[in-house]
Image: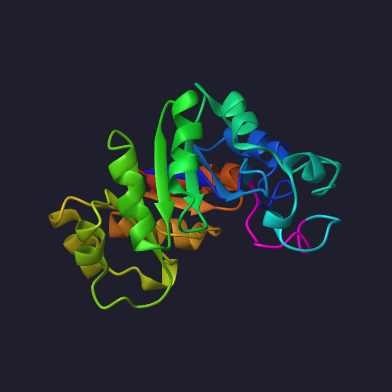
Amino acid sequence: MFIIGHRGARALGPENTLGALRRGMACADLVEVDLRLTRDGIVVAIHDATLDRTTNGTGPVKGYTVEDLAGLDAGEGERIPTLREILDLVHSDTGLVVEIKEPGTEAVIVSALMEMMPERLVLVSFHPASVATAKNLLPGAQAGLIYSQETGGPVALARSVQADLILPRWDRVSRELVKEAHAAGLLVVPWLLNTEDDIGEALRLGIDGFSTDDPCAARRYLDASVRQASPGGA
């Protein structure tokens, strides 16, 4: 079961910054970032469409150039990183999950990724059309459909957009969903699992991986759960 550091490692450093990514890389198999475009078309990592929550700036991300954003504080002296800076950091050490936040930005994001492909790459989005577009542009990468609400058939929807995995919110996961997804050839990678109880339950359900805010704590919890589940374990 693999571990994804959510927004790098949101519990350990300012989300979507190089500092959080470094902390996540210490324990995660992959680290995840949210991607948007600046006014001048540069791919940067920030979750919200606006700057207000995570930086000392205000207004829409797309209203600023990358040079403008470089002068902002994203917490603890960190900056909003560009995708190129992220790729330089994780390139051959850790897998990378990139969430496409804005439909229509897929080609720019994929083009930037192709300049320096990470060891393992997963392209994900809440938007089914973005998943399909990203997979078509970069068929060698894995692609995943994120969802938090009932979709009426997430496995069928994921298959229809050529996804390789589904990323349901944790409270949407059931044994039946895992069985259905696996039968369809899909990995099940829920979010967010931050407690030992949740990670132990995920192990029992047979999920393939999960996203967490604290990858190092999650690694300890997972190792403990595996030991307990093993013959002769505590």
Disc count in the image?
Answer: 0
Asked which colour scheme the image uses, the reply is rainbow
Which of 27/21 is in front? 21
Q: Position of residue 168 (x, y in %)?
A: 38, 64
Q: Eyeballing the image, is 113 above or below 33?
A: above
Give the residue drawn at x 29%, y 70%: 174
Query: Is 155 in the magenta?
Result: no
Name the residue located 54 percent from the left edge and 43 percent from the top edge.
220
Q: Quadrant of residue 138?
A: top left
Q: Is residue 49 magenta?
A: yes
Q: In the picture shown, does residue 81 fall above or below 143? A: above
The quarter of the image holding the N terminus is: top left
Q: Is residue 92 above or below residue 42?
A: above
Does residue 2 appear in this view?
Answer: yes
* Residue 154 coordinates in the image, percent (x, y): 27, 68
In depth, the one of 28 and 160 nearer the eye is: 160
Given the current orientation, which residue lies at the most extreme top position?
92
**Within the image, what quadrant is residue 157 found in?**
bottom left
Q: Range of the magenta residues?
A: 45-54
